[in-house]
Amino acid sequence: MKSQKYKNTAAFVFKLWQREVSEEKISEKEDELLSQWKNQSERDLDKIHMKESKERVLSALELYFIKPVKTTPIYPLKKYAYTAAAAVILLLSVGGILTYTTFFKPDTYTAETGNRKVYLADGSVVTLLKGAELTVDQSFPASTRIVDLKGDAVFSVAKSKTHPFIVRADGFSTKVLGTVFKISQSGKDKSVHLYEGKVAVSSVGTEVSYLKPNQKWTNFGIPHTAAVLSLTTEKKSGMQKAKLLSLSFNDVSFKEVADVMQANYKIKIVYPKETAEKRITADFTGGTADENMEALAFILGLEVHKEDHIYTLKK
């Protein structure tokens, strides 16, 4: 059985609400009490939360409804005010938490011990690789289907010409209308591998890249860097070969630029030490290693000399 103390407090607060709604005259002290709990609760709750929480608290208090509260001397009213305010704030807090959990808290899926398939409401299927985490808002699917990903996953997105599907990852996002692709995130190294359909990949500091099937977007583990590779599989060996289609840098150190170009063109670049930390902004679309090295030398204000696979930059 609930104590008379809490029963009286609940009834007192309920009566205040009832009188406020019916526009019955209330005392200055009672009006001050109502203002106190409103100000406290409205700090953390929006209008929707307030309405739902208030209804929930009213419903709970209705169980305790007793005969009209007798006129109380002014000195005990102050005690009621503090007790009632504390009770209401607590109930509103609990109500707000329950409302958030039920209607607003996103769903989170984690692949803790192995791969895990997640079936979304729009018909899309996400295969989370071990250690990955997918977060989906309660509003999914909306006009734009948005999910958040940590780790690696393969997406088979249900087609929709009017509702884009966006995967927000660490520092980059992938936008599609319906396709199959894989997102990989290992430390700073990010990539998107497209199997079928089309996707647009955007990352901080770089232009949007558009992929076709059997193409891959990557940043090579370098911020403000984006590259598109064409992937082919050799029939005899079964090994996958990558061909660089485009490469862009936005305010990236020359040392990092040189490392990427050496790895992808299978060349060696010799350059003055003082140019290592110089910031480079450049876009290379297509072109041979010779052409792109000439462009890079021009940006640096240097001359380039080639011998076999070695490119030497000089003043």
Image: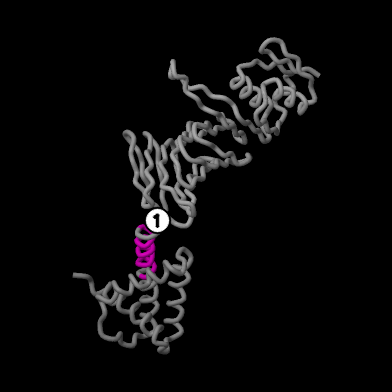
Neighbourhood count class around disc 1 (C-alpha, 10 Å): few under 14, some 14–19, many 20 upward: some
Residue sticking out furthest to the front: 235
Question: Looking at the picture, how far across and down is residue 67, in whole percent?
Answer: 26, 85
Label 1: element kind = loop
Residue sticking out furthest to the bottom: 25
Question: Looking at the picture, how far across and down is residue 224, in whole percent?
Answer: 62, 36
Taking the magenta stretch, the answer to whether it contains residue 121 is: no
Residue under circle 1? Answer: 138
Q: Residue at x 40, y 38 (%)?
A: 132
Q: Is residue 90 left or right of residue 278?
A: left
Question: Looking at the picture, how far across and down is residue 117, in whole percent?
Answer: 33, 40
| Total numbered badges shown on the rendered structure | 1
Q: Is residue 128 left or right of residue 256?
A: left
| On screen, residue 312 above or below 136 | above
Q: Is residue 219 left or right of residue 28?
A: right
136 and 91: which is toward the camera = 136
Question: Looking at the picture, how far across and down is residue 166, in whole percent?
Answer: 49, 47
| On screen, residue 307 above or below 187 | above
| On screen, residue 278 above or below 144 | above
Taking the magenta stretch, the answer to whether it contains residue 89 is: yes
Q: Quadrant of the N terminus?
A: bottom left
For the record, the magenta segment spans 88-101
Residue type, mark 1 in image: Gln
Q: Residue at x 40, y 89 (%)?
A: 24
